[in-house]
Each structure stands twice: as C-alpha cells, then as structure tokens.
Amino acid sequence: DGFEGRSSLTTWIYSILVNKARTRGVRDARTVSFSELTTEEGNIPAVDPSRFDSAGMWSDPPRIWDSLNPERIVAGKQLCVHLAQIVDKLPPMQRAVITLQDIEDQDASVVCTLLQLTDANRRVLLHRARSKVRDELEAILGRSR
C-alpha cells in the first residue's frame, strides 16, 4: 500500500490526508466532548454543593430505612412509579445510560459499546442522571435539600 508512482506524490499525500480526515470525522461524530456535555445544563453542579461539608463529606447523610411494613411496601411501589416518570423526563443520553446500567444492570463496558461512548462520558452522564433522579425523589418524599 505504498507509493507506486502512478500519480504525483502530492496527489498521493493529499489522498492520505482526505482519508484520515474522513476517518477522524466519523470517529468524532460518535463521541461527545466534555464541553458539549456542559452546554446541556450550563455550569450548574450535578449535586448542590451545600449538601457537603468542607471535607467533601455529606453534611446530612442519607437516612437508613427502618424495617419493612405494609405501608412501606405500598409506598415503595408508588415510589417505583414516580421513579419511572422521573427517568422518562431525563435527557435521552442520560436516560439511556441510567436505564442500561442501573435498571437493566448492564456492565459499564456494554453501556459504552451500545451507546458508542467513552468511559469518561458514560460516568459523567450517569452521575448527572443519578443526581437528577435523587433530587426529584427527595422533592417527592418531602426531604430537605
């Protein structure tokens, strides 16, 4: 596949550049840059920084559930309905990542392959999706932020 002299060296090099540009364009179309991810929601943090203390730990840790009882079981079923509605409202890529990884329990590498994402993009999308779901569920449950 080397230069055989049937065309000018300039034409051969130009053809190589065009093919490289096309290949790069196809590859870049499959990935999402971090700058594109931030334009979707601006520079708003996924989790409200006031929820953490100066050491980065939860200022109000998530509460442990008491033992199950019939009321809690019914509430759990209602919560599942709310959860499905919240996930349906997420942006498409966040919805796809959280559905595949958290609901369908797919491995991270499978999620990346199916959605043609880098692992870093998958983690960002998953973090944002989980943060939105958590915020919405806390609002439904009436917990303070």
Image (spheres, rainbow, N blue to C red):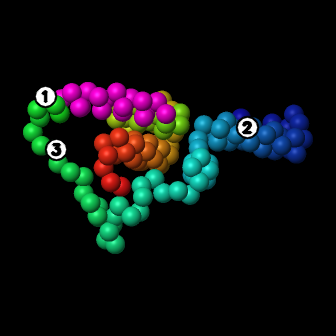
Between 55 and 73, the one lying in front of the other is 73
Of marks 1 and 3, the one in the foreground: 1
Viewer-nearest residue: 105 or 143: 143
| Place of residue 13 in the rendered image (x, y in percent of width and height, measured from the top left) | 81, 44
Quadrant containing the C terminus is bottom left
Q: For numbered disc 3, what is the local secondary structure?
A: loop
Alpha carbon separation for disc pair 3 and 2: 55 Å
Residue 76 drawn in magenta = yes
Kindly identify the residue that appears in the image at 85 percent across and 38 percent down.
5
Residue located farthest toward the right when viewing the structure as drawn = 8
Q: Nearer the viewer, residue 26 or 69?
A: 69
Kindly identify the amino acid type of the residue bearing the numbered disc 1.
Pro
What is the CA distance from the residue labelled 1 to the residue labelled 3? 14 Å
Instruction: Residue 20: name its quadrant.
Output: top right
Helix, strand or loop for the magenta stretch, by majority: helix
Residue 131 horizontal side relative to residue 40, left or right: left
| Amino acid, disc 2 | Arg
Quadrant where the image shows the N terminus: top right
Q: Is residue 137 visible?
A: no
Disc 3 crowd rating (10 Å Cα; few below 14, some 14-19, many 20+) is few
Q: Quadrant of residue 52?
A: bottom left
Is residue 41 in view from this perspective? yes
Q: Which mark is residue 70?
A: 1
Which of pointers 3 and 2 lies earlier in the amino acid sequence? Answer: 2
Q: Does 135 appear above or below 19?
A: below
- Which residue sits at x=38%, y=38%? 108
Question: How far across and down, in percent of the image, does residue 121 sit?
Answer: 50, 46
Residue annotated with mark 3: 65
